[in-house]
Image (cartoon, coloured by chain):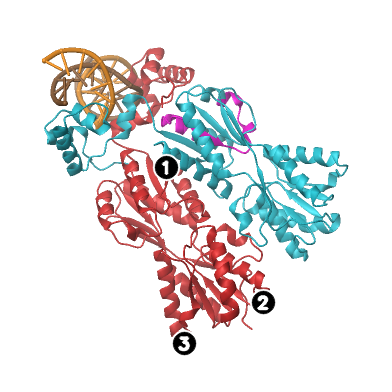
Chain colours: A cyan, B red, C orange, D brown
Amino acid sequence: MDVKKQATIVDVAKKAGVSVATVSRVVNGNYPVKQDTKERVKEAISSLNYVPNVQARELNTRKSSTIGVVVPGLHNMFFAEVIDGIEDAVRQDGFSFLLNCAKNDPMQEMNAINALVARNVSGIIVISPNTKNISERFYEELVARVPLVFINGYHRIKGVSYVGNDEKLGSQIALEYLFGLGHKDILFVRGANSDSYDIKEEAYRQFMEEHGSLREDYILNIGEGNGVETVDSAMNALQGLIPRLKPTAICCCNDLMAVGALNACKRLGLSVPKDISIMGYDNISLSRLVEPKITTMDQNMFQLGSNAAKLLIENIHGGQSKRIMLDNVLIERETTGISM
Amino acid sequence: MDVKKQATIVDVAKKAGVSVATVSRVVNGNYPVKQDTKERVKEAISSLNYVPNVQARELNTRKSSTIGVVVPGLHNMFFAEVIDGIEDAVRQDGFSFLLNCAKNDPMQEMNAINALVARNVSGIIVISPNTKNISERFYEELVARVPLVFINGYHRIKGVSYVGNDEKLGSQIALEYLFGLGHKDILFVRGANSDSYDIKEEAYRQFMEEHGSLREDYILNIGEGNGVETVDSAMNALQGLIPRLKPTAICCCNDLMAVGALNACKRLGLSVPKDISIMGYDNISLSRLVEPKITTMDQNMFQLGSNAAKLLIENIHGGQSKRIMLDNVLIERETTGISM
DNA sequence: CTGTTAGCGCATTCAC
DNA sequence: GTGAATGCGCTAACAG
């Protein structure tokens, strides 16, 4: 674990023939230093290849410019895109971030968070599809010592900030769009174990009920919905279901499921969108890589990440906790069409 | 940037009525402590919610348990999967990692690396598709102060470790496989600006030459090859080229291009693999999400990442630098078939 | 077994 | 403008 010997501020001071305080001043540029000595110091710095030790600095300023990010994993491009957004915002403010994967395991999530606290991060962003699995107590104590931002979390803990999507509204928009196209027999595909699916199902039920088209057997739960295997499990389930139920449209809780639906249709010899329409949710890059490209609701994951980061930094600087709700917009592409 | 006040080792010592040294001992478990006092200390720790300050600890042990990872970005699932592998290995050894995206910009890459050094990371993993853009001097000086591992880098700097794939051999295997299927008119699709493509093209040329089938116009360079837009640019280029050249197979430098080829074929009304075979490279998850699933060469990106991390940790512990070459294996799926 | 003490590298008073 | 001295939280000798 040893790091090779590096020049310290003392070495620089010695070489430049000044005190460490002066070196510190030119490095931080927060106090006046005579032009002449400033240059001598700078010379010494570059000749010694001196890099200030951030740990030491942060130790005695009791500040930290690194934040922690906890995600379930990266296999799913959803999280990767969110992280991209975080990275972007974070860097603009001179912060760095430690990334931890919790593998959808509450235990590991808590461990990761504790490790982050020990590392003295000045804030933490958590993306956890099912935050209900961890006691609120844990988070309450946590937020008492370090600012916390949840992305797409569904509980309410005081002091914790949230960035999320209005998935209920988004679902309604999707459904209205499908209805406007003449679809009445709309299959609903969801996964298990994420609050997000519950919200969407509720929106679906409500909407279909209002339009007198709710049928229990049109609601399909395919289990785990966040991995690459989701595509195949959606496909398999749908391959049997579609011929039996003959829906004119399929409304999926995410794009992975939509791709599965698309593949099922291909195998069944159904033409999309001529014979059947498919609607996704999220707008992960996959949705525009398949052929035909999937119509979906854009969650703008990059925004999700960058908003969370900005919010966290605001909190770190003493800002109030708050919640940001992003609106999802419909991205009309090639998998939806008028119902025959 | 302020972090909320936390209990320090002094608070714990006071509360437990012992010295800080004793607290340190029970925390680290490296020296014997009487069972009785140990418990008193532990009680104090949990009642104060004490978490040892890693920065302080690492400052005076001159060790660091965080490493730095620099990638071009995460949009491409390739990097996401590699990072997954890194995360896994790194955590097993109790390390954490700071992630930085360099956005394919050498300037940003150097900045990111400097920030990492300042943070006192004990090692750095760099994934950079075209490391030639940064002067070797930079890396030479870098590796003199902190262990360095390159993933899929193509230069040779002494002291730097490498983990890479035998892409030359992999390409040969792919080509041989296609040849074995009876294909002689094999289009080669590559991108710009990455050493990887050069290696593969060389393998292609050599192989085709040996088999008397090399045609200059069968080599297609579609430009940027690492973003999601790659799929469309490959598709567009191929849509015009395929009818003119009438290849029986397309060998792509990565799966993104292969998906583009697949989409082009769909638009041209060509059936894959009946009319034309398509071969990818990398085995990113996308390759098995599309329909039909793409035959490809597995780079095993997870392995790439975890090997790099293990190697880095070995180096950190004083091990020699070395290079690891992973073999790529053929994953036969649904886009390749016998040539008519 | 346990307490005391001296730094780790740096920023920051307070004098000069 | 600049230097000397103090302490951030912790570990590692060194004594007892």
In what quadrant of the picture does the N terminus of chain B appear?
Answer: top left
Kindly identify the residue that appears in the image at 82 percent across and 48 percent down.
Answer: A218
Mark 3 near mark 2, Cβ–Cβ under 8 Å?
no
Stretch of the chain drawn in magenta: A112-139
| Percent coordinates x, y for residue A155 in the rendering | 64, 29
Kindly identify the residue that appears in the image at 53 percent across and 54 percent down.
Answer: B77
Is there one chain holding both mark 3 and mark 1?
yes
How packed mark 2 is, by other alpha carbons closer than 10 Å (few <14, some 14-19, many 20 or more), is some
- The image quadrant of residue A43 is top left
Kindly identify the residue that appears in the image at 85 percent across and 44 percent down.
Answer: A216
Closest to the observer: A100 or B75? B75
What separation in Å lies between label 2 and label 1 (alpha carbons)?
47 Å
Kindly identify the residue that appears in the image at 54 percent across and 25 percent down.
Answer: A321
Is there one chain holding both mark 2 and mark 1?
yes
- Tell me, yes or no, whether the highlighted magenta stretch contains residue B306: no
Check disc 1 and report the residue beneath it: B97
Q: Amino acid at mark 1?
A: Phe
| Left or right of C11 in this view: A284 | right
Check disc 3 and report the residue beneath it: B212
Q: Is residue A154 above or below residue A300?
A: above
Judge depth for marks 2 and 1 and give the one in front: 2
- Tell me, yes or no, whether the highlighted magenta stretch contains residue A136: yes
Q: Secondary structure at mark 2?
A: loop
Is there one chain holding both mark 3 and mark 2?
yes
Judge depth for marks 3 and 1 and give the one in front: 3
| Percent coordinates x, y for residue B191 in the rendering | 46, 66
Q: Secondary structure at mark 3?
A: loop
